Image: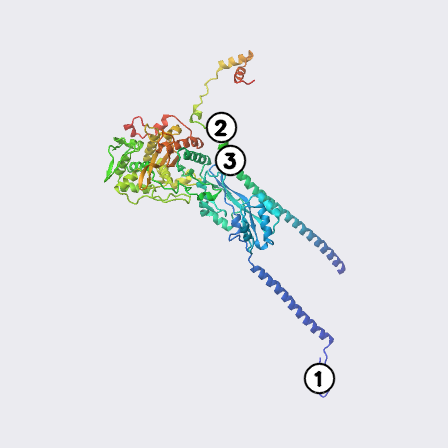
Amino acid sequence: MIRRINIFLICTSIVMLVGVYMLKFSIESTATERTSLQSHISEQEDELTVLKADWAVLNQPAYVEPIVRRHQAELAIDQVKQEQFGSFADLPMRPAKPDTAAMDALFQAIDAGIDPIDAILELEGIE
Amino acid sequence: MTITADGLPQTISLDGVRKARVNLTQARIRWMVLAVVLGFAAVGGRLVQLGMVETDTTIEGQTRDAITATRPPILDRNGLEMAVDIRVPSLYAEPRRIIDVEEAVTKLRTVLPDIDEKWLRNRLSGDQGFVWIKRELTPAIEEQVMRLGIPGVDFITESKRFYPAMNEASHVLGSTNVDNQGIAGIERAMDNESISLLQDLGLARGNALTPVDLSIDMRVQHVLHDQLVDAMTRYQAIAAAGVMMDIYTGEIIALASLPDFNPNDPASALVKDTFNRVTSGIFEPGSIFKTVTLAGALDEGTAKITDEFDARYGVRFGRFTIDDFHGKHRILTMPEVYKYSSNIGTIRIMQTMGKENYRAFLSRMKFDQRVQFELPEMRVPSVPKDFSEVGAATASFGHGLSVSPLHMLTAYAAFVNGGNYIAPTLYKRSVAQAEPLYERVIRPETSAEIRYLMRLNAISSGGSGSQMNKAALGYRVGGKTGTAEKVVDGRYSSNKVTNFFASAFPLDNPRYAMVIMVDEPKAENPQSGTTAGWNAGSLTGRVVQRVAPMLGVAPDFSQVLDQSIVPPEVRRIFPEGY
């Protein structure tokens, strides 16, 4: 009886031993992986700080203005003038009634095969 | 057991085998116990010894945490980065682990040839645990040095401050040293408040620090800086400075002073004349101070805006006679005194309130103390404690006392915002947060009259602010010029002047106040002059023209807005208002 129990106990301890060692090694490899990931993350964070600094430089008005000045002539842009500002109050009100006569004339012209848009496009030089 | 019997010959007594064995076993056990106790004692002693050892984790007197500590990013009011941390590798050595110093020196100099050989040899020999070799290097150099494989040489990642706007906001931001401590500007102010404590405790690591929101608008800051740079060449000035403030919250929207420095290169801040003229420069303000005198007299009620003042003859004080620069030499109304910047008229207005009251008003406007402001670079203004008759007279038009442009700005802000003094700030603040800090210095009615006077100066014919208004048409700017003659060899010089323009806009519903300074300007062309209207004035106009749309001020050319700020009593003397 005692002999059986002993054999059983020895077997169990061998199994436990193997199990514990396997666990230990797997934890060790996980820890290594974690450390390498951490250093990778910190490396990437370092790179990120540099990229963020770059982004901040590119967003500075002091960086953008020289570029604008360089392309000023080509793009035909200039500093905004006071006269160029408008407000909603300056827009004419919508006519009280739709201009039915003008609409009729337009539809009749289109029916007759003359589209006023063609004339405008021709004037602008767009085919 | 011994058996003894009388009369019997002595018998031999022997221990039994069993007993002898017991004795031997007990002795062995004793030896074993002793050995085990000694063994444990040795282990315990070693443990205590190990516990006593203090490992040196400091880096040249600083904790490792302090070296790698980060600073919070600084953002402008729209969230644009003004200062960020970048992490950079720094090269260090542990001399006590270096085996071959000569080899290490030669190898290191292949990658870093600009290091002095002798210095490096001294640095690497010895028994120290930690020495810096070169700080703040690039990742590429780190890679090369690591490839050399020198034992005892390694890298540590440090935080380095980077200012993407370069020179533009230098005086606002200040600078940091190589140990990431603020040495000037808001960086230093932040350290004094809290960050250095966090860094010392080792809490300021990683990127978790909350960003600091400043009140600066980088777009406006850029325009102001750009225009000041332009003015330096345009007027061949030796210095120029400007500052703009939100009059209701006290937030500084832009602050620039030239010549300036690059905060990424802190050594450039040590160059002469790069001090912050807005906060730590004190100047005789000249005629922009007349607004203060008029506001004082109007608020005391000793002079009314419709009153007339005799400016026919200069004011005599013993041997001295104070006269006007562009003398009209006639009787002037108060708006005319302001418009023509009459010294005589201003002295007469000051005299109505008396020199003691006038001095008390200057204290109420806080002209005799430092402005309460975050930047550490501040200077105490120089205002006499008591005025003599002549001292009060010269002070009324801004001579004989020196204040900083920031003083003038806060005073002007209080004059146009309805009469509440609000200390300026560089941190973002809402009107609701600012209101409890308001301190009433003049009545709202006086404030309304000052607004009118400032606008009058810009649009009325002959007003000294008309040069300014040319560029800024439609933005309802108004202000006062100030041309202060500099003292050269004990005398006021007429060709060396400091020019100011203090303004506010849009005056029908003011929101921003600005003070511009140009030091020792020369005429732009033979047709122009050197008085403030020509340089500081037109510079103000150009700045407003560019920044007003950014600040949400739309141009409006309608006369009604200007007419709406004319006080009713002025209509009696000027029916048309201007």
Q: Amino acid at mark 3?
A: Asn
Question: Which residue of the protein is positioned furthest toward the top in this rendering?
Answer: A112
Disc 1 and disc 3 on one polypeptide chain: no
Going by the numbered disc 2, the residue's amino acid type is Gln
Label annotation for residue A15: none
Q: Is label 2 in a helix, a strand or a loop?
A: helix
Disc 3 target residue: A59
Disc 1 crowd rating (10 Å Cα; few below 14, some 14-19, many 20+) is few
Marks 3 and 2, Cα distance to the nearest angstrom?
A: 19 Å
Q: Are marks 3 and 2 on the same chain?
A: yes
Residue A72 circle label: 2
In the shown orientation, is residue B51 left or right of residue B376?
right
**Mark 1 residue element:** loop
Chain holding disc 2? A
Circle 3 packing at 10 Å, graded few (<14), some (14-19), many (20+), is: some
Q: Amino acid at mark 1?
A: Thr
The residue singled out by tag 1 in the image is B4
Task: Kindly indicate whether the residue at mark 3 contacts the one at mark 1 (C-beta within 8 angstroms).
Answer: no
Could you give the CA–CA distance between mark 1 and mark 3, rounded to whole angstroms? 116 Å
Of badges 2 and 1, the one in the foreground is: 2
Q: Is residue A101 visible?
A: yes
Residue A18, position as x, y percentages in the image: 71, 53
Q: State which mark lies toward you, 3 or 2.
A: 2
Q: Is residue B568 above or below residue B62?
A: above
Against B542, is B428 above or below? below
Quarter that holds the C terminus of chain A: top right
